[in-house]
Image: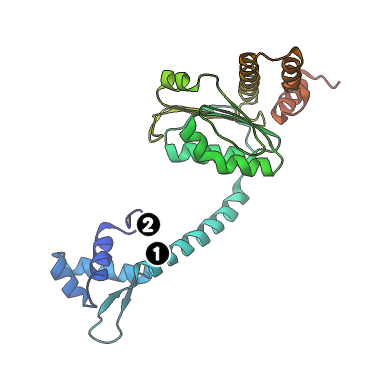
Amino acid sequence: MLRQLGLNQLESDVYAFLLQHPPMTAYRVGKMLGRPTANVYKAIESLARRGAVLIEEGDSRLCRAIPAEEFLTNVESRFLRTTHAAVDALSDLQRPIFDERVYRVESVPALFDRARNMLANASSVAIVDAFPRSLAALRGEISEAIDRGVFVLVKGYAPIEIEGADVVIGSDPKATMSAWIGEQLNIVADGRELLVALLDSEISRIDQAIWSSSLYLACSLHAGLSAEHTLVKLRLLLNEDPSLQRLTDVIRGHRFLRDGLVPGYRDLIARLRNESGDTS
């Protein structure tokens, strides 16, 4: 874990060793660890610069480890300051890029970061079709999107309540999950970007996942998922022996791309008109 925070192996070993022992010289640390003294001196100097070790003034130069909680809190603070500064600096370099390529996503953390960013950036409408573990991982971001006024459709595969979302549960979710074996996660936001993924059942490994900001593909997935959402509602109503009026209300409540709720559809049509020279 210390190596993941930027320390090398020797620095990690020295810091962990000093945490367990009273202050001592770098020479003695090297002897007790069985490491070359010169390398240990360099490691301790590096640890001191990082704020992990204190070195006594004077000839003895005894080395003392900073308590782990204090050191790690300082690491976190420095990381956040650096991150914020990097965001500001890199934002100045960013330029809008028209890119409708399809990209593979091969890291589970990157996959869920992408999903969370899509929900965070949604302005009008988002559709989430997800198996239980994936849906649970995104529940907070779904609620935050709803709080911002985003209309969210959710298709789940186990009972779940998300206040403000239009949630449907498939008529036979266990059969669906059994057929797919793994975890499915499909998201489309504003008809502008899409994420389609199949993971293992523990959401620890990606079998296949793609992301794209293709307007056409995003609008197509939006149309398909919203139609499936309405179809599930109709099937559930049929099981309840509904009245014609209730079925009619569900069908009339279906929102098509052309109804104006999906920004990506408007962008796509505007682009097509510009490319064709149609100014009407």
- Pick out the residue farthest to the right: 280
SS assignment at label 1: helix
**Which residue shows up at 37% across the image and 57% down it?**
5
Q: Residue 105 location in percent, x, y?
A: 46, 32
On the image, the x and y values in percent for residue 202 come to 38, 34
Residue 213 found in image quarter: top right
Q: Does the image show residue 179?
A: yes
For badge 1, the amino acid type reads: Leu
Q: Amino acid at mark 2?
A: Leu
- Residue in front for this viewpoint, 243 or 161: 243
- Quarter occupied by residue 151: top right
196 with respect to 145 (left or right): left
Residue at 55% of width from left, 59% of height from top?
85
Residue that carries the numbered disc 2 in the rendered image = 5
Between 136 and 76, the one nearer to me in the picture: 136
Q: Residue furthest bottom?
A: 58
Residue 24 coordinates in the image, percent (x, y): 21, 77
Residue of label 1? 72
Marks 2 and 1, how far apart in space? 9 Å
Looking at the rendered image, the quarter that the C terminus falls into is top right
**Are there few (<14), some (14-19), or many (20+) residues within 10 Å of tag 2?**
few
Which element type, helix, strand or loop, lies under badge 2?
A: loop
Colour scheme shown: rainbow
CB within 8 Å, label 2 to label 1:
yes
